[in-house]
Structure formats: C-alpha cells, structure tokens
Amino acid sequence: MSLDNNHVVRQLRDMVVSRKNHYGSKSQRGTEVAALFYSLIETARLPGEAPGHDLRRAVLAAIENPGTITLRHRQD
C-alpha cells in the first residue's frame, strides 16, 4: 500500500475547505452535527450520484422517527 493515500486526501479536501470558510464549529455538538452531515453527503456521493435524494430521505426519516438518524440529545 502506498504511503500517501490521494483518494482519501481528496475526499477530505471539501470538508477542510468548508470548515475554514465557516470558521469551524462553536461547540462540540456543532462539530458532531457537521460530521454527521459530511458523512451523509460523502457516502451519498460515493456511487457518483448527487446526494440530494439521499439527504431528503434521511431528513424525512429523522422527522418521522426522531433520534434514528440525527444525534441523540445529551443531558450534560
């Protein structure tokens, strides 16, 4: 296996640029939510399709069954 993994580096580039553009997250919870959405979007992109349809399905599922897709509410 090669020491550098250009495929993974390219996958992470959009996330890093986005994080720099919006100055990161203001809280740990915000970081977790951003990671959840980046994961959903990048997973939907893997087969080469636009993620819009998959994101819509995930949002509708989260509305119908709270806690199944989104992060659980913390009681800190």
Image (cartoon, rainbow, N blue to C red):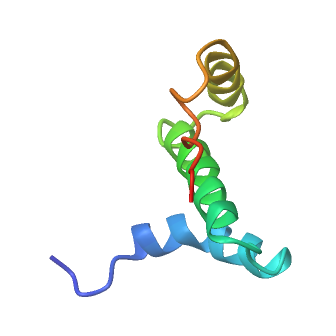
The image position of residue 30, as x and y in percent, is: 69, 62
As displayed, is residue 12 above or below residue 59? below
The image position of residue 46, as x and y in percent, is: 48, 43
Q: Quadrant of residue 6?
A: bottom left
Residue 47 relative to residue 26: left or right: left
Residue 33 relative to residue 44: left or right: right
As displayed, is residue 66 above or below residue 8? above
The image position of residue 4, as x and y in percent, is: 32, 85
The image position of residue 17, as x and y in percent, is: 72, 76
Q: Quadrant of residue 22?
A: bottom right
Q: How many numbered marks, from 0 up?
A: 0
| Identity of the residue drawn at 48% across and 36% down | 47
| Identity of the residue drawn at 69% across and 26% down | 59
Residue 70 relative to residue 21: left or right: left
As displayed, is residue 48 above or below residue 7? above
Q: Indicate the quadrant containing the C terminus: top left, top right, bottom left or bottom right.
A: bottom right
Q: Depth check: 39 or 44 in front?
A: 39
Q: Residue furthest front?
A: 76
Q: Depth check: 17 or 19 in front?
A: 19
Q: Residue furthest left?
A: 1
Residue 51 relative to residue 42: left or right: right
Q: Residue furthest bottom?
A: 3
Q: Quadrant of residue 16?
A: bottom right
